[in-house]
Amino acid sequence: MKNYRSFSDVEESYFRDHPEEMDEYIVLMFEEYAKDGDTGALLSSLRVLSRVKGVTKIAEETGLSRKGVQKALSEDGNPEFASVNAIIHAMGYRLSPQKLNA
């Protein structure tokens, strides 16, 4: 029986090999979240990027435990806004508002 890698594993490997593409990906994933409100997809993408950036490093910078970061970004996670903001900041990004074209 063959062992297949999960999509998350492939994605993680890709960003380890192409870190210059993370900036554009983060913008894209928040644009998609703004359109569809799919929190699970957003957390999944953040989880992949947190593994690329280093969960332990992110935990140290946020003041959360390693397990706390993993739980916040899990499929069943329901993180507080402050936790997501701290994780994003530890990854080297910030959340910023953008006016909607209404």
Image (cartoon, helix red, strand yellow):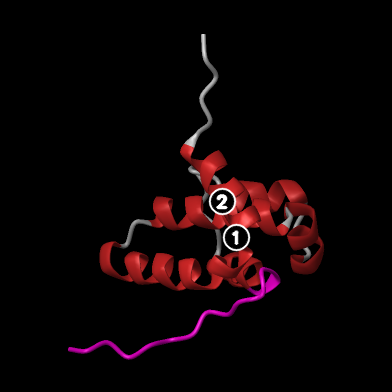
Residue 71 marker: none
Q: Which residue is mark 2?
A: 14
Find out whether residue 57 is within the magenta segment: no
Magenta-colored segment: predominant secondary structure: loop
Structural crowding at the residue carrying mark 2, measured as other residues with C-alpha within 10 Å and reported as few (<14), some (14–19) or many (≥20) = some
Q: Nearer the viewer, residue 46 or 62?
A: 46
Residue at image coords 59%, 72%: 85
- Please, is residue 58 above or below residue 85 in the view? above
Q: CA distance from mark 1 to mark 2?
A: 6 Å
User: Which quadrant would the C terminus be assigned to in this image?
Assistant: bottom left
Q: Amino acid at mark 1?
A: His
Residue at image coords 40%, 69%: 28
Q: Amino acid at mark 2?
A: Tyr
Residue ranking furthest to the front: 17
Q: Nearer the viewer, residue 19 or 75?
A: 19
The image position of residue 7, as x and y in percent, is: 47, 39
In the image, 78: left or right of 88? left
In the image, 51: left or right of 35? right
Q: Which residues are magenta?
A: 89-102
The image position of residue 13, as x and y in percent, is: 60, 46
Q: Nearer the viewer, residue 80 or 96?
A: 96
Residue at image coords 49%, 68%: 26
Q: Which residue is mark 1?
A: 18
**Numbered marks: total:** 2
Do the numbered discs 1 and 2 sit on residues whose CB atoms are within 8 Å? yes
- Dividing the picture into quarters, in which one does residue 42 lie? bottom left
The image position of residue 86, as x and y in percent, is: 65, 71
- Dividing the picture into quarters, in which one does residue 23 lie? bottom right
The image position of residue 62, as x and y in percent, is: 74, 67
